[in-house]
Structure formats: structure tokens, C-alpha cells
Amino acid sequence: MNPLNRARSGRSGFQLRDGLTLREAFAEASSFLRERGVEEADENTRLLLKEILGMSGAEYVMALRDPFPYEHADAERWENAITRKGDGEPAQYILGDQEFYGFVFEVTPDVLIPRPETELLVEAVLGHAKTLWPEGSASVLDVGTGSGAIAVSLKLLRPELEVTASDISPGALGVAQRNAQRLGAEVTFGEGNLLEPFAGRAFDILVSNPPYIPAADIEELQPEVRDFEPRGALDGGLDGLWPYREIMKQLDLLQHDPKLIAFELGMGQADAVAEMLRGRGSWSTVETVFDLAGIGRHVIGII
């Protein structure tokens, strides 16, 4: 089922009036969203409207003075999309996809929506992998893969990598598997808690974007995140660091520690996670990667 066709919520919904131009339909929907307290109402309306009409950016701008194409577009789908957005649902779940590293990934409420900062993690892993394995293949394990954005992107961008991905959520694994199949990425998947499904195996690279929000902070998140994205992919325990501690313990299940380990983490967590890696003693270099806002967003260990 197209995600845009899902039934609207029980709240009074957005109603599209007859006889509007595209610009007027945009203004009416954007005003509806602002009244509902939706942040970036114009940006969300524009994104949804372009998808409903199947228009590129240039086509959309050229058509703004034209009548809303009632005969070509499904007005009920438009009303439903704006109603859902007014209820706070992320536009990515309404549309059913999100771009990541130039690839379009299916997203559903079973998975977190891929964020731009995670592209920096992929970039860092690719850079170090090129140095450590300039020609030969390397084995990669993506722990807590969610939509599969990291694993699939790594495989598509460097096909010689042998990529395995895991998640504890069957729903998330289903999304990741569909993304891999649709995008043509040969990724092996496993279901289970962190490293437990891979006891006795060895990997050259371990990468993970685990849950890292402290449990007490979840209620303070933006409603789009708090009320719609999967709680299990957000909650990192009392201080947000439980998944990192557990992965460090479960490394003993593998034949040996990976030569390259890379984590995404939350604001203010870089020093603590870097200390975990240094305490393990397996990686001669432990570095922090900062995002565009200057936040320590990734910690990487290199043998």
C-alpha cells in the first residue's frame, strides 16, 4: 500500500477547497500546519505537494499559478498527507522514503529516519577502509542496521566489501532487506541482540549507530521523534551509553576485535565512548569526528 493512502487519524482533518491554484493550495495547507504547531510548515508542505503531484523542483515552481490539478492528482491523498503531517507525523513516514548518501531508502515507523550526520560516519569508514584495505576486500558488520542505510550505502559505494547487518527488530530487518534488494546491494542480514548472532565469527570493520538517547531525555525530544520514531531505536538506557558498554563486552564473542570500529553517538558522549575504546586496548588510534555544528558525533578506533 502506498503510505500516502493510509487512513487519516480521528482528528478533524485538512479539507482541500475547490477552485484553488497550486500556490493557493500550498498556502492553505501550510497555514493548517502552522495552526497545528508544525515546525517548518512551508518546507513540509512543499515536500508533500511535490510528491503528490510527481513534480521536480523546476516543474513545481513553473506550475504555481496553474489551477490545482484536481483531475490529475488525488485530492484525498493530499488531504490525508496534510492531515497526518498536522498530527505531527514525520513527512518521511508519510512519503515512505528518505534520501541518504544519494540513495533513496524506504522508511517506515519500524525504523529511524536516516540523518545527514550519519553520512559522515559512512564517509569516515570508507576513508579508513581505503587506507587499510586499498585493494583487497574487508568484512563489515553493521550492528543495529535499522533501514539498512549504513550497510547498503557501504556496499554500493565499495562493492568489494563483504557486508553483514543485524537488528533485534524483525520489522526493521524487513525494511533493510527490501532496501538492499531494491538498490541492488548484496548484504547478509542477521537477527538478534547486538553481537550475539555472530559468536565465533570475525569482522574487519564494525560500525554501529545504536540507541543513545538517555531514557529520561526521550520525553523532551521533538514530538515528531518522540511520538513516531521507534522507542527501541532511541532509548540508550539511563545515561544513553548502555549499547556501547554492551558492545564492548560482546566483542569477546568474536574471534578477535575488528581492525576498525566506528560508532555514532549523542551530544556530549564522545569522551566517554572514546575512553571505552582506549580502555579495551585494541586500537592504537582513537579519534573523534565532529559534525558541521562542531559536535563530537562519531568515535573511531583504528588498529
Image (cartoon, rainbow, N blue to C red):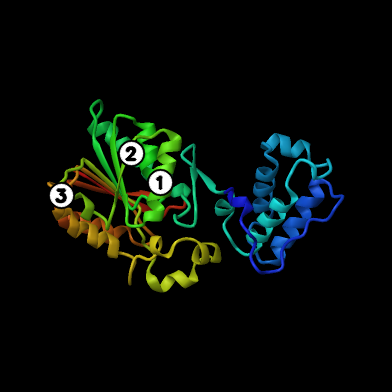
**In whole angstroms, how far apart are the C-alphas of marks 3 and 2?**
20 Å
Q: Amino acid at mark 2?
A: Val
Tell me the residue that label 1 is attached to. 176
Q: Is residue 144 above or below residue 159?
A: below
Amino acid type at circle 1 is Ala
Residue 109 in the figure: left or right of residue 207: right
The alpha-carbon separation of the residues under discs 3 and 1 comes to 24 Å
Q: Residue at x 65, y 69 (%)?
A: 10
Determine crowd level at label 1: few under 14, some 14-19, many 20+ residues with C-alpha closer than 10 A.
many
Q: Quadrant of the C terminus?
A: top left
What is the crowding at mark 3: few (fewer than 14 residues within 10 Å), some, or many (at least 20)? Answer: some
Residue farthest toward the bottom in the current orientation of the protein: 216
- Which circle marks residue 254 in the picture? 3
The label nearer to you, 3 versus 2, is 2
Mark 3 residue element: loop
In the displayed structure, does residue 95 sit left or right of residue 75?
left
Q: Residues within 10 Å of mark 2 (few under 14, many from 20)?
A: many
Q: Quick check: marks 3 and 1 in contact, CB under 8 Å?
A: no
Estimate the x, y position of residue 88 in percent, counting from the top left. 60, 63
Q: Does residue 1 appear in this view?
A: yes
Question: Which element carries disc 2, helix, strand or loop?
Answer: strand
Looking at the image, do the residues carrying marks 3 and 2 touch, with CB atoms under 8 Å apart? no
Q: Earlier in the sequence, mark 1 or mark 2?
A: 1
Image height of 10 relative to 178, above or below:
below
The residue that appears at 63% across and 59% down in the rendered structure is 7
Residue 57: image quadrant is top right
- Estimate the x, y position of residue 13 in percent, counting from the top left: 71, 64
35 or 91, which lies in front? Answer: 91
- Residue ID for mark 2: 187
Q: Residue furthest top?
A: 135
Three-letter amino acid code at the position of disc 3: Leu
- Mark toward the viewer: 3 or 1: 1
